[in-house]
Image (cartoon, rainbow, N blue to C red):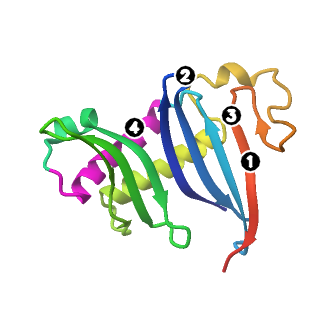
């Protein structure tokens, strides 16, 4: 069983866009291991769309007056965090270019994702599927690297696995949760 914890989207001139994804996994639901992946591999378009959909939710939650047709061009989602105890509680952050030309970094309120088939539930379900696909190596053009590669993950001196795409994956800690 795996639970998504956090997604961060970062941009730098040197590296381009990189994605930091944190999740936890458990065999039995009692002992959880924390994992993190940081990668600048190009994601599938569906992964980027799943993150972009959160812009509509952020703008709505913060009651920002902005036409729907301008939200995707004016809002860059930078973080999505799920509560550690209840992964149906979501906090979305992003950079917003307001209609008056000012730009703000916005951390929205914690939202509760109801099981009602609403916009947040659909967006969060899609995002989780795409994140775990990205973690599992389902990325844009990744099939080019799969044939004849042998062992994809090699351990470096710090115990962090690196695959051929330049990802860093590490198990952060083990802990017991109830």
Q: Quote the CA–CA distance across marks 3 and 4.
A: 21 Å
- Marks 2, 4: nearer the viewer: 2
- In the rendered image, the residue lying farthest to the bottom is 178
Q: Which residue is mark 3?
A: 167
Q: Residues within 10 Å of mark 4 (few under 14, many from 20)?
A: some
- Marks 3, 4: nearer the viewer: 3
Q: Which residue is mark 2?
A: 14
Residue 21 lies, in percent from the top left, at 58, 47
Q: Quote the CA–CA distance across marks 4 and 1.
A: 26 Å
Q: Which residue is mark 4?
A: 49
Q: Give residue 23's mark.
A: none
Q: Are marks 3 and 4 in contact (CB under 8 Å)?
A: no
Precedes in sequence: disc 2 or disc 1: 2
What residue appears at the point 54 percent right and 27 percent down from the top-left corner?
A: 42
- Marks 3, 2: nearer the viewer: 2
Precedes in sequence: disc 3 or disc 2: 2
């Amino acid at each position: 069983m795996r639970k998504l914890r956090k997604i961060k989207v970062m941009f730098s001139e040197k590296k381009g866009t990189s994605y930091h994804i944190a999740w936890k996994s458990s065999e039995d639901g009692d002992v959880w291991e924390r994992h993190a992946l940081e990668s600048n591999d190009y994601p599938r378009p569906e992964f980027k769309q799943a993150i972009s959909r959160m812009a509509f939710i952020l703008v709505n939650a913060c009651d920002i007056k902005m036409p729907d047709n301008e939200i995707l061009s004016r809002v860059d989602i930078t973080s999505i965090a799920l509560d550690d105890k209840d992964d149906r509680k979501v906090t979305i952050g992003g950079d917003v270019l307001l209609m008056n030309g000012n730009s703000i970094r916005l951390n929205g309120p914690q939202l509760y994702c109801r099981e009602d088939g609403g916009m947040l539930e659909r967006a969060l379900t899609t995002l989780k599927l795409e994140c775990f696909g990205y973690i599992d190596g389902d990325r844009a053009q990744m099939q080019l690297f799969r044939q004849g590669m042998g062992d994809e993950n090699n351990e470096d001196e710090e115990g962090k696995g690196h695959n051929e795409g330049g990802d860093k994956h590490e198990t952060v800690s083990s802990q017991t949760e109830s």
